[in-house]
Image (tube, coloured by chain):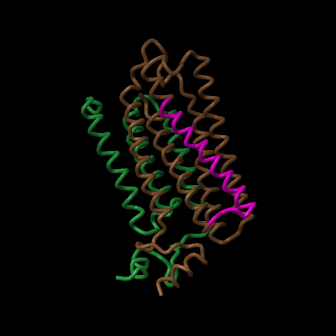
Chain colours: A green, B brown
Amino acid sequence: MTTTDTHEHHGHAHGSDEPHIPTDRYFINVALVLALVTALETSTYWWPDGMQTVATVALIIMMTIKFFMIILVFMHLKFDNRLFSLLFYMGLFLAILVYCITLASFRFFF
Amino acid sequence: MADTAVHAGHESGHHVTTTGLSNNKLAMWLFLGSECLLFGGLISTYMLYRGRTGDGPGPNQLFDIPLTSISSFVLLMSSLTMVLAVNSAKRKDDANTKLWLVATALLGSLFVGAQVYEFTAFYQEGIGFTTSLFSSSFFTLTGFHGVHVSIGVLMLLALAAMITRNRVAGDKAEAVELVGLYWHFVDVVWVVIFTLVYLIPA
């Protein structure tokens, strides 16, 4: 398989070495969604005390959505070669694994 | 033939590599992957010690959520200006690239200013680095992040100055993209810190 073949399979524009990158308007729309999610996150601060468990779950979901929107769209992982994703996810998953084990050994979760 | 390819690659600002990908970009992603381990350790340490406040106030009495929300919004918008700088650089539009780089640096400076204000307010309330395990882990985590943002601001301003003086060696768009990757990573780390440290009740 040639380099050109690899590029085409990973979302690169045909006949070009550069990945297809969306327009400024697309990035502005993504930023508006991120701002909206941030506003929703902040609103949980004023939710009643009885809804703390729901707020915690909602916050983790919103954090995950924001995290992946930034790395996939703003950092272009969605449009770029998979090798870049592999390098980053290796570090991310290793960190999550190691520190979840560490926190569990300190009885953080239970 | 290989010589011709290398020569053509140098002329267009791209180096020919065995993977067909930029080695600089690969190195940056590897670096960012390793940074996950650094911040993972700092966040885990904070999560373990956030209840160890000693005689001092805890996170629920200290944090100013409206202020932190505004600074989070500012950092988020700096990611937008950064991606606009990257797009401008890819279009070889130097004027807009510099404009968006400086705008990103300004927003980053605003964020750092808000963090300095927050630290000063905590200190005036009697919370120092060694007051409790909570304060030590909090200042270490947010301080490390603040240093990363400050380094990012310096990188952005240096890059804008280098573009002005036409001193960027190699592919200009790639240089902007590499600084952009670092900047977005700093933003993504704050997304995690903002939720886990400030918003989820201790």
Would residue B158 be counted in the magenta stretch? yes
- Tell me: residue B112, above or below residue B85: above
Pick the quarter of the image with the C terminus of chain A.
top left
Count of numbered marks: 0
In the displayed orientation, state which residue is furthest to the front.
B3
Does B45 sit left or right of A25 as displayed? left
Q: Which residues are magenta?
A: B140-169
Magenta region, main secondary structure = helix
For image coordinates 64% across by 56% down, the residue present is: B81
For image coordinates 62% across by 50% down, the residue present is: B155
For image coordinates 46% across by 51% down, the residue present is: A67
Pick the quarter of the image with the N terminus of chain A.
bottom left
The percent coordinates of residue B188 (x first, y second) are 49, 48
- Tell me: residue A6, above or below residue B100: below
Does B118 sit left or right of B96 as displayed? left
Nearest to the observer: residue B4 or residue B74:
B4
The percent coordinates of residue B23 (x first, y second) are 47, 65
Does B167 sit left or right of A13 as displayed? right
The percent coordinates of residue A87 (x first, y second) are 38, 58
In the displayed orientation, state which residue is furthest to the top.
B55
The percent coordinates of residue B124 (x first, y second) are 62, 17
Q: Quadrant of residue B118?
A: top right
Would residue A34 be counted in the magenta stretch? no
- Tell me: residue B67, above or below residue B178: above
